[in-house]
Amino acid sequence: MNIQNSIDALFAENRLIRPDYNNCIANLPNSIFRKYGLDTVGNTLPLIDKYLEKDHKNVVLLLLDGMGIKIMERHLKENGAFYSHLTGVYNSVFLSTTTAATTSVMSGLQPCEHCWLGWDCYYPSIDKNVTLFLNQEQLTEKPAADYNVAGTVTPYDNIVDRLNRAGKKAYLIAPFANRELASIDDICREIRLRCDESGSKYIYAYWNQPDGLLHRNGGGTQIVLDAMAHMEEVVSGLAEELEDTLFIITADHGHIDTESVMFKDYPQLCECLVHWPSLEPRALNFFVKEDKKEFFVSEFNRLFGDRFILMPMEEVIERKLMGTQTPHKEFRGMLGDYLAIATSDLSIYFTEECWLSMHGSLTEDEMLIPLIVFSNDRVVE
């Protein structure tokens, strides 16, 4: 079976989820833009548009990192507050990872437009793989450059800044913006303080769990169960108490428990590369020496063909897996020759870190995310 038929079969069998850029997390901020009278940069999200038709004093979007719908199913009670307010299931973006998805929810752009594609990305202008959130050269703690590479080469306009420039009131609440926010309780206290202020406002809040706990402990463990129960209790308690507030809860991606191998343990594959792999262990890209391509494809498929699809990058682009809009001018140069997309529970690591649970690929565990809505007003279907 050729690559095209193989991935089409996996899409048809729902073993992989075809990205839907009319029903994904990149659409959500465009609904917010439209509500507040700003120009959209893409299509809105029908699931939330109906809730935004009514004016609320506060619109709150809380993103719980890693809380995909399958994680909810595994860790929360069906009669709990989150499930009772679940209004729909929709898609992450591809790659289904924090870097790409949170950039989309902050900008309304698809990954091909903003180019924050994965934890590590190759930047042709400096010929380096860069760990984007840290602005470090991959595999080192050295600065990638004397400027913020991703923010300079692939900048984007975030929703909070856009709203504030337009004379609206908007806030960002997140540990990376305020280190004093060290728990979900802290996040909720800050949300309450902002909601109590006078005037209409939009609040985007981010909490980095259960993602971190899932990475380190795997799904179904007691520490994750306890943390999820506490998040549900604290967040739903706040959402139900706030007046004149539309409170939206979602996730950037899901998670899947995985086995791990290290790419460096396959020296014949390593010797084929021009650059070390980047992006994510569940969806990693390869720049391959021209005279080694035939061998690389054959050897990779021999080793991993039952657990990964090795797709030529032109096929990835043609299928618009990373977005349907016009790509950023840097996009193609960052991608390389091939993309390995996980189809099972294996991760191929190209750094020293190995996690028990991971994300980034197209399985339903990783791609399907919840839209949970608390509102004082019942929406008629």
Image: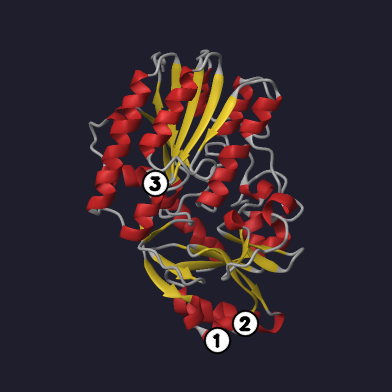
Amino acid type at mark 2: Cys
For the residue pair 14 and 284, the one nearer the viewer reads as 284
Indicate the amino acid at tag 1. Gln
Q: SS at mark 2? A: loop
Q: CA distance from mark 1 to mark 3?
A: 38 Å
| Above or below, 103 relative to 306 | above
Tell me where residue 86 sits by quadrant: top left
In the rendered image, residue 381, in percent from the top left (x then y), is placed at 41, 18
Residue to which mark 2 is pinned? 272
Closer to the chain start, of discs 2 and 3, is: 3
Q: Is residue 279 visible from the viewing direction of this image?
A: yes
Q: How is the image coloured?
A: secondary structure
In what element is the residue under mark 3?
Answer: loop
Which one is closest to the eye, mark 1 or mark 3? Answer: 3
The circle on residue 268 is 1
Residue under circle 3? 209
Q: Are marks 1 and 2 in contact (CB under 8 Å)?
A: yes
Mark pair 1, 2: CA separation: 7 Å
Secondary structure, mark 1, is: helix
